[in-house]
Image (spheres, helix red, strand yellow):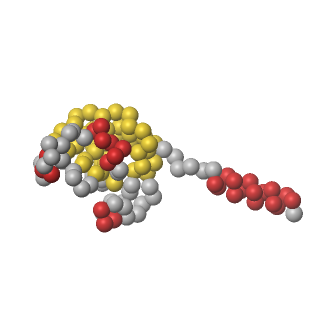
């Protein structure tokens, strides 16, 4: 009985301690006044991201919604969600939880 209890305890502890694995992602960050996404290099599928994590990738707004659109090339570390429906009415198949911004380059304004 003690052996069974020990085995079950170890199994529960090992399951509880497994954290999602983070990876490094490279691609294009897109933002506008109502959404933000990340499209990995080599893909056309954007993933939802929290724009607050990539504020440094955004150019300052001049106060007009048309000027609050832009892109940047970024390298980030993060954890990709399982496939599902995320952000903006479930329009994205994944959410990338950014844990670290490694590099930002080529910041540009875009127009709608």
Is residue 45 shown left or right of residue 68? right
Q: Is residue 34 above or below residue 110?
A: below
Quarter-of-image position of residue 84: bottom left
Residue at 45%, 58% (x, y): give it. Answer: 82
Residue at 41%, 45% (x, y): give it. Answer: 98
Is residue 71 shown left or right of residue 40? left
Asked whether residue 28 is in view, the answer is yes
Where's the N terminus, which quadrant?
A: bottom right
Q: Where is residue 35 in the image (x, y as percent from the top left)?
A: 26, 54
Q: What is the residue that sits farthest to the front in this orientation? A: 63
Q: Where is residue 23 in the image (x, y as percent from the top left)?
A: 46, 42
Residue at 75%, 60% (x, y): give it. Answer: 8
Q: Position of residue 91 (x, y in %)?
A: 30, 63
Quarter-of-image position of residue 58: top left
Count of all numbered marks drawn on residues in the image: 0
Q: In this view, does 91 lie above or below 79?
A: below
Quarter-of-image position of residue 94: bottom left
Residue at 34%, 46% (x, y): give it. Answer: 52
Q: Observer-nearest residue: 49 or 75?
A: 49
């Amino acid at each position: 009985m003690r052996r069974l209890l020990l085995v079950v305890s170890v199994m529960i502890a090992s399951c509880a301690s497994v954290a999602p694995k983070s990876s490094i992602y490279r691609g294009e960050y897109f933002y506008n006044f109502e959404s933000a996404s990340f499209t990995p290099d080599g893909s056309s599928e954007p993933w939802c991201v929290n724009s607050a994590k990539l504020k440094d990738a955004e150019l300052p707004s001049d106060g007009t919604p048309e000027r609050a659109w832009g892109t940047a090339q970024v390298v980030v570390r993060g954890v990709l969600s399982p496939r599902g429906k995320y952000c903006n009415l479930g329009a994205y198949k994944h959410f990338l939880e950014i844990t670290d911004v490694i590099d930002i380059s080529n910041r540009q304004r875009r127009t709608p």
